[in-house]
Image: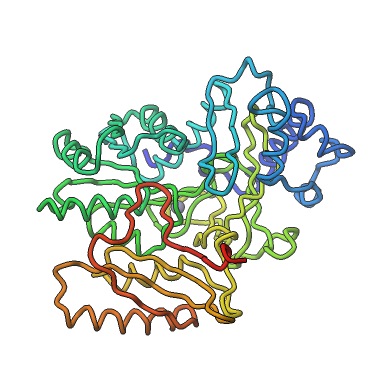
Amino acid sequence: MKYWNPYLETLPRETICKMELSHFRNIFSHAKTHSILYQQKLKGIEPNDITTFDDIKKIPLTDKEELRKYQEIDPFPYGGTLGTPIENITTFRQTSGTTGKPVYVPESYESWQWRIEVWCHILYMAGFRPHHRVFLPFGYNVYVAFWEAHYASEKLGCEVIPGGALDTKGRIHKIIEIKANAMMNTPTYGLHIAEEARNMGIDPADFKIDRMLCAGEPMPTATRKRLEELYHCHVFDHIGGTEPCAWAGMCEAKDGMHIIEPFFLVEILDRETLQREVEEGDIGVAVVTPLGRRSFPLIRFNTKDLVVKGKSSCSCGRTSQKIGEVLGRIDDLRKIRGVLFSPKTVEEVVRQQFQEVEEFEIVVERRGLMDVISLRAEVDPQLPLESIGQTKVRLAESLKIATNLSFIVIMEPPGSLPRYTLKAKRFKDLREETK
Ligand SMILES: [Zn+2]
């Protein structure tokens, strides 16, 4: 079967929109009745006032800071963000806390099952099927995506191997021993496992992995293709977050991602005003309303993810709205010498044109009145000395073309830059620390 839910995934656009409007009214009404945050925030707007998508645009957005603020009141630790009595909560989740105090996410059994169903759509779209033995090379801890992938793989009928409590070498041995044929990991860790395997004299293609789903970081196409070459497998991406859940995933066409409709209403808004929906092909901020999750209702959650608005047709036959490229978090964009800079552009250049670069780091600092940007790069230790010099020159040229900025390129000895398993921190803006 081609689709996880053949009915929902091929509905006419008009029907999807009608369903989303109706689901939105329901979750709005639920949030207003059950959550202190929304009782206060949505005062003066009634569910019956919402009859069109334009009406939705008048409702204020919700951001992470508000969730944190309302979690300071009782009941601990969810406070005014709860959408159900605390007795109904069966699962605690939280954000990773990389951007400040974590947000605690309460899931009732019903809401957790809703998240798992969303994940079944994502995994099925990426070709996960009952014959897959899925290896998850992490201790999941607070990283909700791996818990979701675990339960959803089970629901699809796959066999799941949790790979926590092992180091990378141990995981490689386990993948081989148990003949795992599917994986889910961050792109960074996928590259790291391949590098480590090669150091052990093992070709990662010999794992015979068939499907890989990536999570946790924005993945440039060049990185996805590099993983496909290394593992000789199909690699898919998705986008989401702990608060709203994963809300879009890649299909076999590997051309953008399908929004999981009608589970979510996703608006791609103009990044300056956050009011107007952008046109197809334009960049905007994703604002997401999960439409069926009641224990932690979110109305128009500002994900701060910058994405390109995509098409609403696809060669796979699904009729859901798509998004194109994911450009990263709006918080990661920087002005350097007056030029708007995204660290993702550097990753795209490095992964696409410099197979010999194994790890890199971008550092921005202020020297006197000047912003200086450097790339520290670590290359394959087998590379001859003269080639290292050529790589250095080519890196500086290619980065200048792609970003309009002059980089100082520093070649580092093998193994000197940090390696990451979950959220990679390859971009350091030291100007912020000296402000
Ligand atoms: Zn498709």
Tell me the quarter of the image containing the N terminus.
Answer: top left
Q: Is residue 157 above or below residue 50?
A: above
- Image quarter for residue 24? top right
Residue furthest right in the image? 44
Give the colouring mode of the picture: rainbow
Q: Is residue 430 above or below residue 216?
A: below
Describe residue 12's horizontal placement relative to residue 407 as left or right.
Answer: right
Q: Residue 51: x and y, percent?
A: 81, 43
- Image quarter for residue 377? bottom left
Q: Residue 125: x and y, percent?
A: 41, 44
Tell me the quarter of the image containing the C terminus.
Answer: bottom right
Q: Residue 126: x and y, percent?
A: 37, 46
Kindly identify the residue that appears in the image at 49 percent across and 62 percent down. 325
Pick the front one: 376 or 281: 376
Describe residue 23's horizontal placement relative to residue 320 as left or right.
Answer: right
Q: Residue 9: x and y, percent?
A: 51, 42
Q: Is residue 122 above or below residue 371?
A: above
Q: How many marks?
A: 0
- Image quarter for residue 290? top right
Kindly identify the residue that appears in the image at 25 percent across and 34 percent down. 131
Kindly identify the residue that appears in the image at 53 percent across and 24 percent down. 91
